[in-house]
């Protein structure tokens, strides 16, 4: 891409904004070197990296790039055999640590919400913790070599500190002496040339032996190393030299270790720079309110409310542009300061940003094209530079564009043909546009010439456009209108400003009839556009209202669902409590049964078992189920009568209705009787009528139910003949009452009564099946008969 074009479209300002979002010097360097690409796949990959970084920044915040610096110079010195200083080694250790933090941050992001491109880059980062630990074991946070770096260094420093302590103690004894204090300028111990000295007045120089190391500016004070400590200072000097040699040895060892990992660390720096660059693009997108454009290489461009990124969001007017589908050339007309140049720069700059892998400040579903080059001849007529420019400079620039452009180029021309005679300028502008249009490139051109309006109107693939102008306020709105050529508005503006009507009428007479027809056509188009715009706004308002109503409805529905769920949870908790209480009562009944068995042995009376079973029946809780508990496909309620076989919703069990009282029904479920709501029942099978069972003689009998009928008959103590009579009567009553199952208590005894009753039941017409009682029903002392 031509550097002049990048400068004209102010791409460098976007790059500067991008680099400010980089967290490291590595990322800044990559950002400053960013360049638009003409390869579609490359652009898609860079946009994908931006999208992943944008998402990561939104979900997890900034990546931890702290501590990472450009250590390339230090690595190079380690490779060529130089010795790194403690500060450089500390930077290397901090960079290794920072690289590890970034790697773990990105991989954690990938686990939570996939970011495959960033994860692949992060996987390339090495983790040389051995080198990091080795450096940090020797160098502290202040970039000083620690005593623990080596045993020899620790020994030297211990001896050095002990020697310094002894020298200071010796000198302090001297300065505290009253005879010496009068000879000192100050009673202090100080250091000159790494040797301990005391400040002696000039006139007492002869009283001290030793070495003079310095004197004050006035010469009144001499800094003397007394002869008594010369040997001690010499020893300290030797220890300091030993310390320096040991430190140098340690640094050389760490440098050699660093050189072994230099190649890996160089690659890490490149990856970290690219990662930082991707996150910088994501943060820039957040700041600009930018979105990811869809890319193509078909020459198709569609901007939806695109904004110039260098104009404040509260001031910029969004632009809608479509190019490369029905038309490949747009000719924009309109007055000065209307925003034509800004629209051109917006299209060009957003194209450069997209081709560089950056999001663009536009609405979703915007599409951008990968051009092989973007050419621009743009000059701001309101600037000093434009006033100084000439027709020749514009033409030279256009000639260069004509020599380089291809069918896959984007050409932006501002004030085409300006700066010369209007007739010649318009003719030249038409000829240039015609040549470019035939080549097939994408063109957006602005002009003042009305001749170009007619040219665009008559040419296929070329469309007029204009910058909207509000005649009422005499000011531009900066909106680009595709399909509507611009009007001069000169007469309207003059009239609004108070120019005499007679002068305006004379001016209108000077305008050719053809020009007037064009102006009238444009005025008609403008009127139709305003009408359509008003209708669109009305439709948009209605759409927003419908969306608000839908959102409100959904919110109310969600609220209802939440309340329903809370009620269901509460009901379930109450049901659990009720069942727990019932289970506790049942356990107590079972305990009582066991106690009875233990007290009376195996001869527990049947009537006691029956009484215990009745208590168990009474302990069963009433479970009420709301109508919402029924299946959605449940049919409308049916009339339920005694004897009918029914399904109890709340229990999921079948049973037979014994009696109905108001809205409640007593249902027989096995050996249990339960009182449930009629609304909790579903009819499964009607009780069979006696008509199909009784002889014709009985057809006139009215089937009634005895309110005192019972489900069990106790025959204990009766002989077989009496028992058969009672059983026959009991079965008839049970059949008329519609009972599905009855219990005949005969006791165990010798078994004669049980055998006789069983034989009678086998032949009885109302009995479907019969069996001995189960455990809890009385066992062999009870016969259970199921009725037809």
Image (cartoon, rainbow, N blue to C red):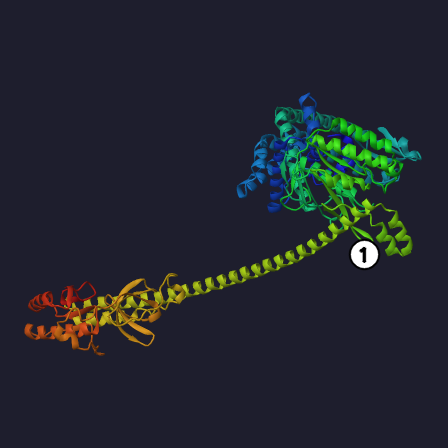
Pointer 1 residue: 472
Asked whether 642 or 490 is in front, the reply is: 490
- Left or right of residue 715: residue 538: right
Task: Give the residue displayed 66% in from the left and 54% down from the top.
Answer: 536
User: In what quadrant of the picture does the N terminus appear?
Assistant: top right
Residue 44 vs 564, above or below: the answer is above
Residue 241 is situated, as x and y percent measured from the top left of the image, at: 73, 26
Question: Can residue 640 be seen at all in this image of the molecule?
Answer: yes
Residue 594 is situated, as x and y percent measured from the top left of the image, at: 22, 66
Give the crowd class for mark 1: few <14, some 14-19, many >=20 residues within 10 Å.
few
Residue 62 vs 747, above or below: the answer is above
Asked whether 537 or 124 is in front, the reply is: 537
Residue 224 is situated, as x and y percent measured from the top left of the image, at: 85, 32
Asked whether 214 or 502 is in front, the reply is: 502
Asked whether 287 or 480 is in front, the reply is: 480
**Residue 6 picture quarter:** top right
């Amino acid at each position: 891409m031509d550097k002049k074009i990048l400068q004209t479209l102010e791409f460098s300002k976007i790059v500067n904004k991008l680099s400010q979002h980089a967290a490291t010097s590595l990322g800044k360097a990559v950002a400053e070197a960013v360049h638009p690409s003409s390869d579609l796949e490359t652009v898609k990959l860079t946009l994908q990296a931006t999208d992943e970084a944008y998402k990561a920044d939104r979900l997890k915040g900034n990546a931890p790039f702290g501590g990472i610096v450009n250590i390339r110079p230090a690595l190079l010195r380690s490779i060529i055999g130089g010795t790194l200083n403690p500060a450089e080694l500390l930077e290397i250790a901090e960079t290794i640590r920072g690289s590890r933090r970034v790697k773990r941050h990105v991989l954690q992001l990938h686990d939570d919400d996939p970011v495959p491109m960033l994860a692949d880059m992060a996987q390339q980062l090495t983790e040389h913790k051995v080198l990091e630990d080795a450096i940090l074991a020797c160098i502290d946070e202040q970039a000083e070599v620690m005593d623990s770096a080596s045993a020899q260094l620790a020994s030297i420093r211990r001896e050095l500190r002990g020697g310094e302590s002894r020298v200071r103690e010796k000198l302090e004894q001297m300065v505290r002496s009253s005879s010496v204090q009068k000879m000192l300028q100050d009673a202090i111990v100080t250091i000159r040339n790494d040797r301990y000295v005391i400040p002696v007045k000039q006139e007492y120089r002869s009283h001290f032996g030793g070495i003079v190391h310095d004197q004050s500016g006035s010469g009144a004070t001499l800094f003397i190393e007394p002869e008594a400590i010369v040997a001690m200072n010499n020893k300290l000097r030797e220890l300091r030299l030993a310390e320096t040699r040991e430190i140098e040895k340690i640094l050389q060892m760490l440098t050699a270790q660093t050189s072994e990992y230099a190649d890996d660390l160089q690659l890490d720096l490149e990856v970290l720079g690219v990662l930082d660059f991707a996150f910088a693009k994501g943060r820039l997108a957040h700041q600009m309110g930018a979105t990811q454009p869809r890319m193509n290489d078909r020459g198709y461009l569609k901007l939806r409310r695109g904004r110039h990124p260098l104009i404040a969001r509260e001031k910029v007017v969004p632009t809608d542009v479509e190019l490369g589908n029905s038309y490949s050339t747009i000719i924009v007309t309109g007055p000065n300061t209307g925003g034509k140049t800004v629209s051109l720069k917006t299209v060009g700059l957003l194209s450069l940003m997209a081709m560089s892998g950056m999001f663009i400040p536009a609405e979703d579903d915007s599409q951008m094209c990968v051009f092989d080059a973007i050419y621009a001849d743009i000059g701001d007529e309101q600037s000093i530079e434009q006033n100084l420019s000439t027709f020749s400079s514009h033409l030279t620039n256009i000639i260069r564009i004509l020599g380089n452009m291809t069918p896959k180029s984007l050409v932006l021309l501002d004030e085409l043909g300006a700066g010369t005679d209007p007739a010649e300028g318009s003719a030249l502008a038409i000829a240039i546009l015609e040549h470019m249009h035939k080549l097939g490139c994408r063109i957006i051109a602005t002009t003042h010439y009305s001749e170009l309006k007619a040219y665009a109107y008559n040419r296929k693939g070329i469309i007029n456009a204009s910058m909207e102008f509000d005649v009422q306020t005499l000011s531009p709105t900066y909106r680009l209108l595709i399909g509507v050529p611009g009007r001069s508005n000169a007469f309207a503006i003059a009239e609004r400003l108070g120019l005499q009507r007679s002068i305006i009428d004379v001016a209108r007479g000077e305008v050719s009839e053809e020009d007037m027809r064009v102006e009238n056509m444009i005025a008609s188009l403008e009127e139709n556009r305003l009408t359509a715009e008003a209708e669109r706004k009305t439709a948009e308002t209605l759409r927003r209202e419908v969306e608000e109503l839908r959102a409100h409805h959904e919110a109310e529905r969600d609220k209802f669902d939440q309340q329903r769920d809370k009620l269901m949870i509460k009901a379930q908790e109450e049901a659990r409590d009720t069942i727990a209480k019932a289970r506790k009562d049942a356990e107590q009944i079972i305990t009582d049964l066991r106690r009875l068995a233990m007290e009376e042995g195996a001869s527990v009376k049947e009537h006691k078992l029956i009484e215990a079973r009745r208590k168990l029946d009474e302990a069963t809780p009433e479970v009420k189920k709301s109508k919402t508990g029924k299946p959605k496909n449940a049919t409308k309620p049916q009339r339920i009568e005694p004897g009918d076989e029914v399904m109890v919703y709340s229990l999921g069990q079948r049973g037979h209705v014994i009696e109905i009282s108001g809205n409640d029904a007593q249902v027989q479920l096995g050996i249990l009787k339960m009182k449930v709501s009629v609304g909790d029942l579903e009819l499964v099978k009607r009780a069979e009528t006696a008509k199909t069972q009784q002889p014709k003689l009985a057809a006139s009998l009215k089937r009634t139910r005895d309110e005192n009928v019972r489900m069990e008959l106790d025959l204990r103590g009766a002989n077989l003949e009496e028992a058969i009579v009672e059983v026959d009567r009991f079965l008839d009553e049970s059949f008329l009452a519609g009972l599905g199952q009855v219990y005949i208590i005969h006791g165990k005894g010798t078994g004669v009564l049980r055998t006789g009753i069983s034989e009678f039941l086998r032949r009885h017409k109302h009995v479907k099946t019969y069996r001995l009682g189960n455990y809890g029903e009385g066992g062999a002392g009870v016969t259970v008969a199921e009725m037809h």
